Image (cartoon, helix red, strand yellow):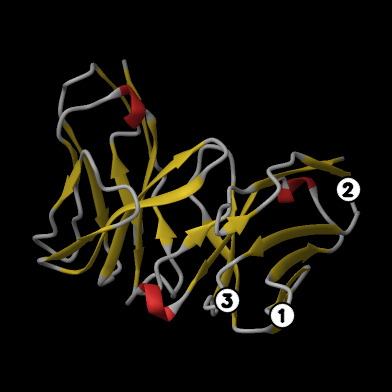
Amino acid sequence: QKEVEQDPGPLSVPEGAIVSLNCTYSNSAFQYFMWYRQYSRKGPELLMYTYSSGNKEDGRFTAQVDKSSKYISLFIRDSQPSDSATYLCAMSAEDSNYQLIWGAGTKLIIKP
Amino acid sequence: NAGVTQTPKFQVLKTGQSMTLQCAQDMNHEYMSWYRQDPGMGLRLIHYSVGAGITDQGEVPNGYNVSRSTTEDFPLRLLSAAPSQTSVYFCASGRRGPQETQYFGPGTRLLVL
């Protein structure tokens, strides 16, 4: 079993829909949770960053961390075609020198 | 600022050949790392460095060497290329460590025949 599980998709939704992307993990020591967005043939870029539990909102994006369920989510409101990309979750813990453990990524397609 | 730059963008090698993938950053970041990205497997850490002269192994270090003689540069050397090393390679840098924002380069696509 992988430490971080993420459905690879693709997930295809119409423009304007609310998108929910998720990752589950097995290591209860994870404290730092990140979502990176990767456009085709580009490097990943940080989208959202959360320390420990709770919610964080930035414009149309909301990141949630539920440590009791070992589950993190990224919500995208009013999705746009420009949101079409692969979304990678990553997480780290102090006891492993904060090295990032990555999900496989979910490919998201927003249809105009 | 150019950010993180990688060269070459694309390379074809024959089995047994060696090559160096170049990575440079102009943000004065202490932490630099190399990942490989394969379909369905996410990013896997090859080697990382927490400062000039300090490097360490990641999850998949076999077949790769690194050095960090300056803060700016972090080259990755493939010693004797194998088809299993066909992948997309990303270099990343962060101010102090991986728990902070990582800035990625555009990647190098490597094909080993």
**Relative depth, front residue between B1 and A10:** A10
User: Which residue, given by chain and number where applicable, does mark 3 sit on?
Assistant: A28
Give amino acid for label 3: Ser
Q: In which quarter of the image is the C terminus of chain B?
A: top left
Residue lying at 20% horizontally and 54% vertically, measured from the top left:
B74
Estimate the x, y position of residue B54 in percent, counting from the top left: 14, 67
Q: In this view, does A7 lie to the left or right of B58?
A: right
Judge whether A76 appears above or below B44 on screen. Answer: below
Residue lying at 27% horizontally and 63% vertically, measured from the top left:
B26
Q: Is mark 2 on a helix, strand or loop?
A: loop
Question: Of the residues tagged 1 and 2, which is closer to the observer?
Answer: 1
Circles 1 and 2, Cβ within 8 Å, touching? The answer is: no
Estimate the x, y position of residue A28 in percent, counting from the top left: 58, 76
Label 1 to label 2: alpha-carbon separation: 33 Å
> Would you call the spot at circle 3 few (<14 residues within 10 Å), some (14-19), or many (20 or more)?
few
Label 3 to label 2: alpha-carbon separation: 36 Å
Which badge, 3 or 2, is on the more N-terminal residue? 2
> Would you call the spot at circle 2 few (<14 residues within 10 Å), some (14-19), or many (20 or more)?
some
- Chain of the residue that carries numbered disc 1 in the rendered image: A
Q: Can residue B28 be seen by looking at this rendering?
A: no
Which badge, 1 or 2, is on the more N-terminal residue? 2
In this rendering, do the residues under marks 1 and 3 share a single chain?
A: yes
Circles 3 and 2, Cβ within 8 Å, touching? The answer is: no
Estimate the x, y position of residue B109 in percent, counting from the top left: 38, 32
- Chain of the residue that carries numbered disc 3 in the rendered image: A
Give amino acid for label 1: Ser
User: Which residue, given by chain and number where applicable, does mark 1 sit on?
Assistant: A68
Q: Can residue B81 be seen by looking at this rendering?
A: yes
